């Protein structure tokens, strides 16, 4: 990176940390620290709702997903608008009027303290793991750009974020999230412009996308009903609906966002903002990944986008095998580039026969290129012993650092830094809230001063920052990061959603029913996930239905003591 890029990154990080620390004036009491005294405007809450979910994983993982798999991932969000409408009518006014700090406080009022504690514990485990993935995403980028040790890079990201979150509370989280969203949108727009301008003379955006479409990357809707397929219309609409209901309605990291709003209507508006903006924004990021793929149709991409593993294989006993793959790859790339130009020429000439022949030739070369890349990835797995290795997380950072002009590189790296730090801060703040309110204040120290709870909250935030950093060390090599974070969540969100359905949706549910229903939901999800190849999105449906069925069955034979 050029010195100009470093200056941009440094200036932005200093600004973000400074802005977070100066928010300590609004965090001198527990309600101010956790909920900003329920005073934030709807648009700021709406931006922080999206920013908490987005993070650097979206920039790294989703663009890589678009490069490798195209637009299909956008189906994942098809259930989001419906989920936001349902939550706006039900849980948003419910939680707001209950004046709770956490979503799980209500479960004790409706059932008992055991149900509240178990639900909060499930949140702490799932969100603590996911916070580690959120740190891992930018750490992957920095370890590539700077050549630093991955563990040290994770510490460098997690430590300053933990510090300003400890002192600034939810005020720091919210207003850094607002800045994050502005920078992310500006940065991604700038990348798209750079990609369009980087196409060869005579090749328009439509031409490039047409060639990319031959590989199926522009296919968005898949109406097949296949429980083993992750990204289909039905898995996104139904499985995604349950996931989004569980995430935005039962996950403290999101519930806490709209509990900071000025009013019930402000909370509703913040969710509806996410409902109508999230899918177009996600489509833009996926399209960026496809444009990166189209860009590399006319430029020479590396055989492996991770330069560290490229060097490892070249230095191993299988270096000659890798060199042969690289030679074959360069030969196929040249043939693919020629075929891509032929598709463009035939398309511009309006010759259907020539277009058909050129598309067939390109498709054949693309299959050959994919096969060679897969062999290279397989070679990495054998040399490094990392059976889960995938190249998808390294596509976008490698493109940014090797192809973008000076200044824009710094802007994008700063955006990824800011996205990661703000999202991590939101996770740490919500983890601290659930730990202190649901565990410490409820079970350990029930009658202390506000000052005491505030001091403990800051210490707990520090603990979760360390925990997430440790998880991040292992999360960086778990596959596509955007899938990893959602796979983690799908083990828990459905079951949490199920217990809230019992709480709000029926008066017949009892405390024993809710507790054993929650246990039954987790057992059902674990069993289905370990004995079948069902897509993780459907685990949310399995968990919610299992909780409801078991909970109602137990409630019929085991009435509540209340």
Image (tube, grey):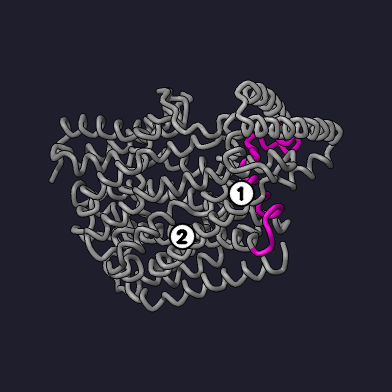
Which residue matches tag 2? 181
Q: Position of residue 479 (x, y in %)?
A: 59, 39
Bin the neighbour count of mark 2 within 10 Å (Cα to Cα): few under 14, some 14-19, many 20 and up. Answer: many
Residue 331 in view, yes or no: yes
Q: Secondary structure at mark 1?
A: helix
Task: Count up the numbered dots.
Answer: 2
User: In the figure, 532 relative to 514: above or below?
Assistant: above
Dominant secondary structure of the residues highlighted in magenta in the image: helix
2 or 1: mark nearer the eye: 1
Taking the spot 22% from the left edge, 63% from the top edge, the residue there is: 263
x then y, percent, for residue 241: 34, 38
Quadrant of residue 500 in the image?
Answer: top left
Q: Secondary structure at mark 2?
A: helix
Q: Residue at x 70, y 34 (%)?
A: 341
Figure quadrant of residue 489: top left
In this rendering, position of residue 474 left or right of residue 372:
left
Q: Position of residue 53 (x, y in %)?
A: 43, 51
Q: Mark on residue 196?
A: 1
Give the number of the disc on residue 84.
Answer: none
Residue 265, compared with residue 243, is above or below; it is below
Q: Is residue 144 visible?
A: no
Q: Mark 2 or mark 1: which comes first in sequence? A: 2
Q: Is residue 241 magenta?
A: no
User: Where does the N terminus fall, quadrant-wise?
Assistant: bottom right
Left or right: where does residue 295 sit relative to residue 105?
right
Residue found at x 59% / y 43%: 205
Instruction: Please name whichever residue, 163 or 121, is drawn nearer the observer in this view of the structure.
Output: 163
Query: For this view, does 42 lie left or right of residue 321?
Result: left
CA–CA distance in space, label 2 to label 1? 23 Å
Q: Is 399 covered by the magenta stretch?
A: yes
Highlighted range, magenta: 378-407
Q: Residues within 10 Å of mark 1 (few under 14, many from 20)?
A: some
């Amino acid at each position: 990176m050029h010195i100009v890029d470093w200056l941009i990154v440094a200036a932005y990080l200093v600004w973000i940390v400074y802005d977070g620390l100066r928010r300590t004036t609004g965090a001198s009491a527990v309600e101010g620290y956790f909920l900003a005294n329920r005073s934030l405007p709807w648009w700021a809450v709406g931006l922080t709702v999206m920013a908490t979910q987005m993070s650097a994983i979206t920039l790294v993982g989703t663009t890589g997903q678009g490069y490798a798999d195209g637009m299909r991932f956008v189906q994942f969000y098809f259930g989001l608008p419906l989920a936001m409408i349902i939550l706006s009518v039900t849980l948003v006014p419910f939680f707001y009027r209950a004046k709770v700090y956490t979503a799980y406080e209500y479960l004790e009022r409706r059932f008992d303290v055991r149900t509240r504690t178990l639900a909060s514990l499930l949140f702490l485990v799932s969100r603590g793991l996911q916070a580690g993935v959120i740190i891992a995403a930018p750490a992957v980028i920095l370890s590539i750009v700077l050549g630093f040790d991955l563990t040290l890079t994770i510490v460098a990201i997690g430590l300053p974020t933990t510090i300003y979150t400890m002192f600034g509370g939810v005020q720091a989280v919210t207003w850094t999230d607002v800045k994050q969203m502005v920078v992310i949108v500006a940065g991604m727009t700038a990348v798209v412009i750079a990609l369009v301008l980087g196409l060869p003379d005579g090749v328009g955006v439509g031409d490039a996308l047409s060639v990319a479409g031959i590989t199926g990357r522009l296919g968005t809707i898949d109406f097949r009903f296949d429980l083993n397929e992750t990204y289909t219309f039905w898995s996104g609409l139904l499985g995604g609906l349950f996931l989004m209901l569980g995430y935005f309605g039962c996950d403290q990291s999101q519930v806490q966002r709209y509990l900071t709003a000025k009013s019930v209507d402000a909370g509703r508006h913040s969710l509806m903002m996410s409902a109508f903006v999230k899918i177009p924004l996600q489509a833009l990021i996926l399209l960026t990944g496809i444009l990166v793929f189209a860009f590399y149709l006319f430029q020479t991409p590396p055989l492996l986008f991770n330069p560290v593993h490229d060097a490892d294989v070249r230095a191993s006993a299988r270096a000659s095998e890798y060199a042969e793959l690289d030679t074959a790859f360069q030969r196929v790339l040249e043939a693919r580039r020629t075929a891509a130009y032929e598709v463009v020429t035939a398309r511009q000439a309006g010759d259907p026969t020539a277009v058909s022949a050129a598309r067939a030739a390109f498709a054949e070369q693309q299959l050959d290129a994919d096969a060679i890349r897969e062999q290279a990835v397989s070679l990495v797995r054998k040399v490094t012993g990392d059976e889960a290795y995938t190249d998808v997380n390294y596509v976008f950072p490698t493109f940014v650092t090797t192809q973008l002009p000076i200044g824009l590189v710094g802007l994008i790296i700063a955006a990824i830094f800011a996205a990661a730090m703000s999202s991590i801060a939101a996770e740490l703040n919500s983890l601290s809230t659930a730990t202190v309110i649901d565990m410490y204040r409820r079970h350990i120290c029930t009658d202390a001063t506000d000052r005491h709870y505030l001091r403990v909250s800051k210490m707990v935030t520090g603990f979760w920052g360390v925990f997430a950093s440790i998880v991040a060390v292992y999360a960086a090599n778990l596959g596509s990061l955007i899938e990893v974070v959602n796979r983690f969540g799908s083990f828990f969100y459905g079951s949490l959603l199920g217990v809230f359905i019992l709480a709000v949706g029926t008066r017949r549910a009892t405390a024993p029913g809710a507790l054993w229903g929650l246990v039954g939901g987790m057992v059902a999800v674990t069993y289905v996930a370990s004995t079948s190849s069902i897509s993780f999105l459907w685990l949310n449906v399995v968990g919610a239905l299992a909780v409801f069925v078991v909970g109602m069955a137990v409630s019929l034979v085991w009435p509540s003591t209340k």
